[in-house]
Image: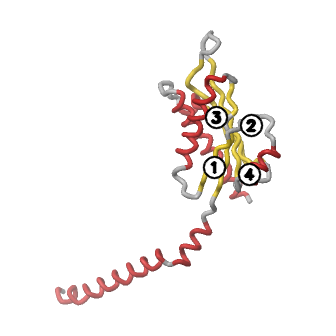
Amino acid sequence: MKNALLSTTPLCILLLFLQSCTTLYASTDPVNEKLSAQKKQNYQIVYFNPQIEPNIEEIKFPTYQAFFDGMTQKTATYDNIRIMRIDDPQSYQNVDLDMVRSVCKHNQSNIAIVPKIKYFKVGLGKYVFSNQVVVTLKMYDANGNLLAESEHDTYKKNRKLLSNTENSIRMGVSGAMDGLLKKLKYLERRN
């Protein structure tokens, strides 16, 4: 029995070595790298500054910054997505499709996102807001066709009343982007 084990041990080592060599060759083969690169489509996304409700000048810049941080955090995990910010807010209800087409063309992007952020008003004062928001996103292709629309209500979905407004916007962006990705995957499977 001991002799049988000793005689098969070099054979097992040789088989493991050959298997590791083929794995190493497959991972460094330029043909395989080209095929895997072709499978992953690169996306260049432009997004506009969000339309903010209520329209109060003092909250616009912090909202834009929190929205940009949320978009950056959400897309940082994907190596095939590049984002570009357009400092021009679009009307969410009446999107200028000609502008979307021209921005996509000039920035060589294939997707445009038009966002809207709505703050909850609480209390009796004129400027008393909750830290909870509703983030709504519309996604267009480079030709101006609406691909998907998604909404994320941080109060209904997360139930976190103790977080600050910036974190609520980031969570809303993440949730709305997840909704867009789910809808796009569903559309791809249907076609």
**Type of amino acid at the residue the image marks with label 3:** Val
Label 2, label 4: how far apart the Cα atoms are: 14 Å
Q: Residues within 10 Å of mark 3 (few under 14, many from 20)?
A: many
Residue hosting label 1: 181
**Type of amino acid at the residue the image marks with label 1:** Leu
Q: Say the numbered circle drawn on residue 90.
A: 2
How far across and down, in percent of the image, does residue 46 sit?
67, 48
Label 3, label 1: how far apart the Cα atoms are: 15 Å
How far across and down, in percent of the image, does residue 115 sit?
68, 38
Q: Which is closer to the viewer, label 1 or label 2? A: 2
Label 2, label 3: how far apart the Cα atoms are: 15 Å
Q: Which is closer to the viewer, label 3 or label 1? A: 3
Q: Are marks 4 and 1 in contact (CB under 8 Å)?
A: no
Q: Are marks 2 and 3 in contact (CB under 8 Å)?
A: no
The residue at 67%/39% (across/down) is 87
How far across and down, in percent of the image, does residue 109 sit?
70, 54
- The image quadrant where one finds the N terminus is bottom left
Residue hosting label 3: 135
Q: Residues within 10 Å of mark 1 (few under 14, many from 20)?
A: some
| Sequence-wise first label, 4 or 1 | 4
31 left or right of 143?
left
| Sequence-wise first label, 3 or 1 | 3
Q: Quadrant of residue 24?
A: bottom left
In-front residue for pair 139/161: 139
Q: Residue furthest top?
A: 124
Q: Which is closer to the viewer, label 4 or label 1? A: 4
Q: Are marks 2 and 4 in contact (CB under 8 Å)?
A: no
Q: Quadrant of residue 63?
A: top right
- The image quadrant where one finds the C terminus is bottom right
Q: Which is closer to the viewer, label 2 or label 3? A: 2
Q: Which is closer to the viewer, label 4 or label 3? A: 4
Residue hosting label 4: 104
